[in-house]
Structure formats: structure tokens, C-alpha cells
Image: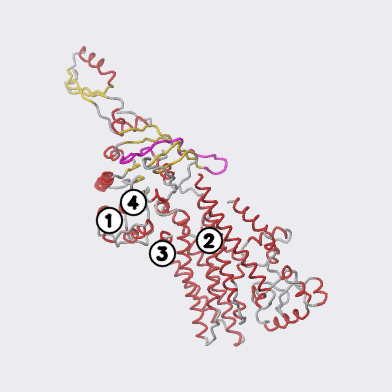
């Protein structure tokens, strides 16, 4: 595992030095600041408004970070041939995939924590209380971000980056839908749509902006189970990505 | 498997599928050869002959369609054997955001090597990158990237060096330095598979050569065998018309008959000597060109 | 690749528990749907949250923001609250304030997680073995 950790640190340093990370981070922070500056019709609702849309902004940020950081990683490695000396000698394919994933996941988590901090500062600036569940909610979004990251890796092994963006975004949207909404997309084949929806992930479990904005008590076990679910689904997506990668010839 | 050769390739074939209705391309077909302990084997062939495909199959980057590869008797994917290999890819490239010292430290860590910065400084000096250790790779020329690649390959003191066109694009001085390093590694005990277009390099340092053409192995043998396989002789005579020396190359079988006919023609034979062919002659003859 | 997807689909669908989703119509106990008390409680709660109308999940009654599907029996006893079967709103909010739902969600999430983990391990080793064979 030492090789994986070293390679993940190498990936982390590489991504840290790229402008993509900083560009996306800036966009999210600007969007959060924009949300806070939208005039509220009712002062008592401003906290809810900022929290609700702020967490939604962070969630969309997780998607942008996953795509911006990982969609070009493998295609670029192949194109520039940096992949060859790595796969030929020190790393096996699963080590390469896991190393790249962990590096990107760490930097994505750090960036999302920064955006959470940004949201807290905005709440403080408006003299609004910071809910205790804000940090755990961000943690859930981080796990959702990892799931999206694994999805981006999966698609990157058989599509180009321009195709990866719409595919991952589509999965992101679909994974937030209930069965009824999903069946509504193609009402003529309810059985098929229902079966497909069952296989697709339920990303709505990471999606607790409403309960937090409305001040509901959330049991700690919920966070634990949802995080476990996110990690397991990510592991599954990564294993599929690995199966595709293992079948690839590196010409 | 302690006595197994460092590299054994048996009946190796590789087909690449093309787009629909275009069928497939046979990149290499039924190639068998080996690299024995302590040998430097030249791997030569024209563009598209299948050298890089063979090397990528050896390293597990491509899956053979048929046949197999073994490294010290094990599959190429086995971690134990991968640790013993040094690889220099064709046109190597590295992530621009790092410098050579960072790269060497990361590769050392991934390979489980316990080297210090001072060791890597020595290595960089050896490959001609002294003074460049903290410079970003984005500023490196093609030749410097190849030197960087050599440093990474030598870092683990490999038992088998696999080099794919390592001296392509290098100037003559750099090529000479590369050759010297390869010979030093060989004298340390490393076996080498050297794929190259530069036949003079192969002729100078290799003990054996394998010639590929259109995906097939067409000649293989020790350098002495390849260069002397037809036992050619060069006869120098004085021309009656011009009075100048003229050279003629003939095979050993025809030598006596030709000498007799020259004597009958009252030609003055100045000298008869063994005509040494170059690897280029052999390569041209083997691949359909002509012997000088 | 296709074989892994098939394998996954068959294993996943063979677990009976996975054939239900989070929709109230599918998972709510009959007692709950029959219970007027519960329904009224929900209604009261939803009234408290009428400001939250921006959620992406659709609901037909924007004024109340009420969330549940009601079978015919319930529809009969609650005219005026006509939600399409399976509809829910406010994202995951509904199971945070319905005591019967939480254990169902924990169990389902945990079971799904274990299935995915098992599948991940299986795909990892199967693809590794397939590669070695070559």
C-alpha cells in the first residue's frame, strides 16, 4: 500500500499545482457569496435560505470538482505517455487507479471543507447561527463528491472528457430522483424504468440541506450509514472502472 | 526457476482490432526469442516491424493474442519480477509540474527503495543531469527527458533493462554516454534488451541481435554469426584498363574459381582478405534490401 | 464489462428487499397509512414548513408542502390531499420526521452498502483473474 499512498500524494501535489482546482474553488466561493447577497423578503428566513442554497451550492461544487479534477487525469496520462513508465514497472493497474483516486479525493475533500468554511463565514457575517450539523452535512457532501469522482473515473476509461461531463452530470441528476420521478421520464415503460432506477445510486441520502435548514434533529447513525453507503457505492464504481482498465491495451 | 532466463518470449502474437468492417491488424506473429543472463540483445526492425508492440507485451502493457512471456520464469505481472526491471519507453514524458529529484524520490518510494537525496544526486550526475535536479521537467528538452528516463530506469539497479529507442534523437556525444552506461550496467550483471534504429549502436555494444520485419522474426543470432554468416572475401586487383586498384567481394564458395580466372586474365592480385559486413548490410539483406 | 453489469443486476435484484424504494406508497406500514392521527400530525408539521417550496422534488400541493402518497383507502378518507402514488417531496426530509421510516432507511442503506461492497470485491478479483489468464 506504500506505493498507492506515495502515488496518491504525487497526484495530490500535481492537482494542487494545477489552475483547475483554484478556478473551481473560486467559482464556488463566489456563488456562495452571491447567494448570501440575494435580498430576502423575510428576515427570519434568511438563515434557511443561505443554508439551503449554500449547501446546494457546495453539492454542485462537489460535482464540478469531481469533473474538473478527474475527467482528464487518465486521458492526459495516456496522451502524454506518463502512464507507461508507471504501469510498466512500479505500479499495477489497481494501484494506479486507487492512487489517482485517493489523491483527487483528498484534494476534493479539502476544497469542499474550504467552501463549508466559506459558508460559515457568510452566516457569521450576517450574524446568523451556525447549525451544529453543518459540518457533518458537508462531510456527507464530501462522500457524495467521492462517489461522483469514482463515476468520473469509471467513464474516463472509455469516453473522452467532453463526453464524461454530460454522462456524470446526468447520473448526478438521475441519482437525486425518486422512483416516481424517474418512471415519469419514460411513462410507457414503467417496469424497465423502475428496475433501472433501483440499480442507480440513491444520492439523495447525502442531500440533507432541507432538514438542516429547517433545524430537524438528525441522528448520528444516519450520518454513519449514509457515509458507509457512499463509500461502498464508490468502491463498486471503482471496481467497475478497474475491470474496464484491466481490459485495456495501452498502445 | 532460479536458472530461468531473464526474458523468454514464446510464440507471441498480437492482433489489434480495427473499426468495424476493417478487420484486424496482425502486429506481431509467432515471435520466439530469449534474453539470457548477462547478454545485451539488440532488437532491430524497420518502423512498424513490431518492436514496441513486443516490448509492451513483455511489460504487460498489451495483452498478447497468443503465446506468452515469462520473466525469470514468472508472469510479467508478478510484483517480484517487476521490481527487477528497468524500462525506458520510446519518447518518454513525465508530469511537467515536478522536478527530477521529486520524481526520483517518488519512484523510489513506490518501488520500496531506501535511497537518499545524495544517492539520487549521484545518479543524476551519472546520466548527465547534474545541476538540473530542481528544475521543472517542463523546461527539459527531449534529450534531457531521455536522460531522466534513464535515471529512473537505473534507480533500482535492475537485473533486466528494457530500452525502447533510448538513443533516438540524441546527439552523438549523448549517444556515446548512453552506450557507456549500458555497458557499465551490463558489466554489473544486468541483461539488456535494446530496441534501436541506430544499427551502429547495436553493432557496437550488443552480443546478439534479433531482426524483425512486418511482425515476424526473420533473423536471430550472435553478432559474430550474423556478420559473418556468408563468409565473404574482398579481392583487390589492379585494373588493366586504368592501372588502379579495384575491389571485388565474393563468397567463399566462389573464391577459388575467381582467383583462377583472374590469373588466367593476367590480373595482378594485390590482396585477398575477409570482407566484414556491417549490421546494416545484414539488416538490409534480411529485410529485402541488398548487401553492399 | 457487460458480464459484470449482468452479474451485478442479477445479484442486486435477487435481494427481495431491493425491490422497494423509498417511496411511501411502497414502504409505509398499512397502520401508518390508515392512521388518521399520523396523517394529521404530518399535515400539521408540513404546515410549519410551508416556506420550503424550492426543493427540486415535485409535489402537487405547493401550499401545504405535504409529503406522502396515499392509497385509495386513504384518499377516500382525506379528500383534497390528492398526491400521486409514490410522490415525495423535500428530498430526504420525510424520513427524518416519521418514526417508522428511520429504521427502514437504516436497514435498506446498510443492506445496499453490503451488497455493493460484496460486488466490488467480486468484480476486483474476477477482473484480476481474467487478466492473469491472458
Q: Give the residue number, with chain letter if any, for mark 3.
A: A9
The tag on residue B153 is 4
**Residue B189, image quadrant:** top left
**Residue B275 position in % (x across, y down):** 24, 27
**Residue C106, image quadrant:** bottom right
Crowding near the residue tagged with mark 3, few <14, some 14–19, many ≥20 C-alpha atoms within 10 Å: many
Disc 3 to disc 4, C-alpha distance:
21 Å
State whether residue B161 is above or below residue B252. Answer: below
* The furthest residue to the front: B2
Q: Which residues are magenta?
A: B17-46
User: Which numbered disc, 2 or 3, marks the residue that appears first in the sequence?
Assistant: 3
Image point 28% across, 38% down: which residue?
A: B200
Q: Is residue B239 left or right of residue A31?
A: left
Disc 1 to disc 2, C-alpha distance:
38 Å
Q: Element under label 4?
A: helix
Choose between A251 and C110: the one closer to the eye: C110
Choose between A79 and C7: the one closer to the eye: C7
Disc 2 to disc 3, C-alpha distance:
20 Å
Q: Are marks 1 and 2 in contact (CB under 8 Å)?
A: no
Choose between A177 and C134: the one closer to the eye: C134
**Residue B220 position in % (x across, y down):** 36, 33
Q: Give the residue number, with chain letter if any, for mark 1.
A: B124
- Considering the whole magenta stretch, tell me its main secondary structure: strand
The tag on residue A179 is none
Amino acid at each position: 500500500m506504500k506505493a498507492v499512498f506515495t502515488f496518491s500524494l504525487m497526484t495530490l501535489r500535481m492537482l494542487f499545482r494545477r489552475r483547475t482546482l483554484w478556478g473551481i474553488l473560486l467559482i464556488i466561493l463566489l456563488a456562495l457569496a452571491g447567494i448570501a447577497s440575494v435580498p430576502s423578503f423575510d428576515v427570519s428566513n434568511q438563515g434557511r435560505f443561505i443554508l439551503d442554497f449554500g449547501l446546494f451550492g457546495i453539492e454542485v461544487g462537489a460535482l464540478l470538482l469531481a469533473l474538473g479534477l478527474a475527467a482528464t487525469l487518465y486521458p492526459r496520462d495516456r496522451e502524454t505517455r506518463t502512464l507507461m513508465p508507471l504501469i510498466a514497472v512500479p505500479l499495477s493497474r489497481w494501484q494506479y487507479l486507487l492512487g489517482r483516486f485517493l489523491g483527487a479525493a483528498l484534494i476534493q475533500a479539502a476544497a469542499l471543507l474550504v467552501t463549508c468554511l466559506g459558508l460559515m463565514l457568510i452566516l457569521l457575517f450576517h450574524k446568523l447561527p451556525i447549525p451544529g450539523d453543518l459540518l457533518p452535512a458537508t462531510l456527507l457532501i464530501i462522500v457524495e463528491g467521492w462517489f461522483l469522482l469514482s463515476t468520473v473515473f469509471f467513464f474516463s476509461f472509455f469516453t473522452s472528457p467532453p463526453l464524461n461531463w454530460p454522462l456524470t452530470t446526468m447520473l448526478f441528476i438521475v441519482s437525486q430522483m425518486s422512483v416516481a420521478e424517474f418512471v415519469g421520464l419514460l411513462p410507457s415503460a414503467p417496469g424497465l424504468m423502475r428496475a433501472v432506477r433501483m440499480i442507480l445510486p440513491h444520492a439523495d441520502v447525502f442531500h440533507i440541506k432541507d432538514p438542516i435548514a429547517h433545524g430537524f434533529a438528525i441522528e448520528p447513525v444516519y450520518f454513519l450509514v449514509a457515509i458507509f453507503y457512499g463509500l461502498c457505492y464508490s468502491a463498486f464504481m471503482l471496481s467497475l472502472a478497474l475491470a474496464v482498465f484491466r481490459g485495456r491495451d495501452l498502445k | 526457476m532460479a536458472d530461468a532466463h531473464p526474458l523468454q518470449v514464446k510464440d507471441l502474437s498480437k492482433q489489434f482490432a480495427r473499426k468495424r468492417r476493417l478487420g484486424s491488424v496482425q502486429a506481431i506473429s509467432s515471435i520466439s526469442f530469449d534474453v539470457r543472463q548477462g547478454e545485451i540483445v539488440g532488437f532491430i526492425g524497420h518502423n512498424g516491424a513490431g518492436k514496441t508492440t513486443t516490448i509492451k507485451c513483455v511489460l504487460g502493457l498489451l495483452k498478447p493474442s497468443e503465446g506468452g512471456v515469462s520473466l525469470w520464469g514468472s508472469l510479467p505481472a508478478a510484483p517480484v519480477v517487476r521490481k527487477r526491471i528497468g524500462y525506458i519507453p520510446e519518447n518518454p514524458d513525465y508530469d511537467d509540474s515536478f522536478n527530477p529529484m521529486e520524481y526520483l524520490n517518488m519512484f523510489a518510494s513506490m518501488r520500496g527503495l531506501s535511497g537518499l537525496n545524495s544517492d539520487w544526486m549521484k545518479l543524476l550526475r551519472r546520466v548527465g543531469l547534474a545541476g538540473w535536479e530542481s528544475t521543472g521537467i517542463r523546461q527539459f528538452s527531449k534529450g534531457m527527458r531521455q536522460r531522466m528516463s534513464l535515471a529512473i530506469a537505473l534507480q533500482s539497479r535492475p537485473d533486466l533493462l528494457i530500452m525502447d529507442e533510448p538513443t533516438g534523437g540524441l546527439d552523438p556525444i549523448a549517444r556515446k554516454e548512453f552506450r557507456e552506461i549500458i555497458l557499465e550496467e551490463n558489466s554489473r550483471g544486468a541483461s539488456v534488451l535494446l530496441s534501436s534504429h541506430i544499427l551502429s549502436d547495436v553493432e557496437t555494444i550488443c552480443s546478439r541481435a534479433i531482426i524483425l520485419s512486418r511482425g515476424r522474426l526473420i533473423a536471430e543470432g550472435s553478432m559474430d554469426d550474423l556478420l559473418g554468416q556468408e563468409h565473404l572475401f574482398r579481392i583487390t586487383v589492379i585494373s588493366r584498363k586504368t592501372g588502379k586498384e579495384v575491389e571485388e567481394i565474393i563468397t567463399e564458395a566462389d573464391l577459388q574459381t575467381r582467383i583462377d580466372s583472374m590469373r588466367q586474365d593476367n590480373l595482378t592480385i594485390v590482396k585477398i582478405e575477409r570482407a566484414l559486413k556491417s549490421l546494416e548490410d545484414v539488416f538490409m539483406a534480411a529485410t529485402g534490401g541488398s548487401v553492399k | 464489462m457487460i458480464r459484470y453489469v449482468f452479474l451485478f443486476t442479477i445479484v442486486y435484484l435477487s435481494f427481495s428487499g431491493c425491490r422497494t424504494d423509498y417511496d411511501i406508497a411502497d414502504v409505509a406500514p398499512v397502520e401508518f397509512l390508515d392512521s388518521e392521527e399520523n396523517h394529521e400530525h404530518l399535515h400539521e408539521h408540513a404546515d410549519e414548513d410551508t416556506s420550503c417550496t424550492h426543493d427540486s422534488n415535485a409535489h402537487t400541493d405547493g401550499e401545504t408542502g405535504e409529503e406522502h402518497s396515499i392509497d385509495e383507502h386513504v384518499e377516500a378518507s382525506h379528500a383534497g390531499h390528492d398526491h400521486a402514488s409514490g410522490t415525495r417531496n423535500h428530498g430526504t426530509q420525510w424520513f427524518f420526521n416519521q418514526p417508522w421510516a428511520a429504521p427502514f432507511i437504516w436497514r435498506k442503506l446498510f443492506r445496499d452498502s453490503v451488497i455493493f461492497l460484496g460486488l466490488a470485491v467480486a468484480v476486483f478479483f474476477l477482473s484480476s483473474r481474467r487478466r492473469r489468464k491472458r
